[in-house]
Image (cartoon, rainbow, N blue to C red):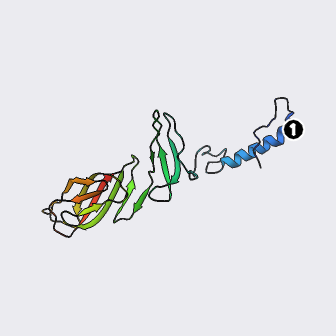
């Protein structure tokens, strides 16, 4: 079956000539509509069952007051991710946010938040002066840390936040050397 958009060919065409093409057009439209949608005459007609989107090689264009939702290969994950592209403002192209992109495990990893920020977590055995690199980020905005498994509130742990450079920070504070520490960071 093929959809024939030029049916009828003109206003003077005899309906008996165009009737087979009109019937075929309705069949094609019904087949197309039934993919991922509630069927015609169903209580859920017109509603999506789910969405499937082919991966795009590049971000679609957006204009002012428009956004685009599409799929593309994640820059860090290298798999198909759901991406949102913000509206273009003047001559500035809208930013893209691969907000399903994530990597890692329970022990260490990162996830992209819908705002575009990255939430990262990991643990490391550190001493004062150790450096830690947060995976998945290029710039850290804030880091918090806890000593792993410690119930001793006297083992407070702070970070020398002045020593953040890109996605690397230096540990400072009151840790016992070689202590396992869990870090959570926000950045991009």
In-image side of 80 versus 178 (left or right): right
Residue 85, percent from left and from top:
48, 43
Q: Indicate whether 150 appears above or below 25.
A: below
> Which one is nearer the viewer's eye here, 61 or 104?
61
Residue 87, percent from left and from top:
47, 38
In-image side of 35 versus 159 (left or right): right
Residue at the spot 58% in from the left edge and 52% down from the top edge: 54
> Which one is nearer the viewer's eye here, 56 or 154?
56
Extreme-left residue of the structure: 154
Q: Indicate whether 88 appears above or below 141.
A: above
Q: Indicate whether 117 appears above or below 179.
A: above
* Residue on which disc 1 sits: 17
> Which one is nearer the viewer's eye here, 69 or 17?
69
The number of numbered badges drawn on the structure is 1
Residue at the spot 76% in from the left edge and 43% down from the top edge: 25
Q: Secondary structure at mark 1?
A: helix
Q: Indicate whether 33 appears above or below 14.
A: below
Residue 137, percent from left and from top:
36, 55
Extreme-top residue of the structure: 12
Q: Quadrant of residue 177?
A: bottom left
Residue 26, percent from left and from top:
74, 43
Residue at the spot 79% in from the left edge and 43% down from the top edge: 23
Residue at the spot 61% in from the left edge and 51% down from the top edge: 36
- Graded by Cα atoms within 10 Å as few (under 14), some (14 to 19) or many (20 or more), the crowding at tag 1 reads few
């Amino acid at each position: 079956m093929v959809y024939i958009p030029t049916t009828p060919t003109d206003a003077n065409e005899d309906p008996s000539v165009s009737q087979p093409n009109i019937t075929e057009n309705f069949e094609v439209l019904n087949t197309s509509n039934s993919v991922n949608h509630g069927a015609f005459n169903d209580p859920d007609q017109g509603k999506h069952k789910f969405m499937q989107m082919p991966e795009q090689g590049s971000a679609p264009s957006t204009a002012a007051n428009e956004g685009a939702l599409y799929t593309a290969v994640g820059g860090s994950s290298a798999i198909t991710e759901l991406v949102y592209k913000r509206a273009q403002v003047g001559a500035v192209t809208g930013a893209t946010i691969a907000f399903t992109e994530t990597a890692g495990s329970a022990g260490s990893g990162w996830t992209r938040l819908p705002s575009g920020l990255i939430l990262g977590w990991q643990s490391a055995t550190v001493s004062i002066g150790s450096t830690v690199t947060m995976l998945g980020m290029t710039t850290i905005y804030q880091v918090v840390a806890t000593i792993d498994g410690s119930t001793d509130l006297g083992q407070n742990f702070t970070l020398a936040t002045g020593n953040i450079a890109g996605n690397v920070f230096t540990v400072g504070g009151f840790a016992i050397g070689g202590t396992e520490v869990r870090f959570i960071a926000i950045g991009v």
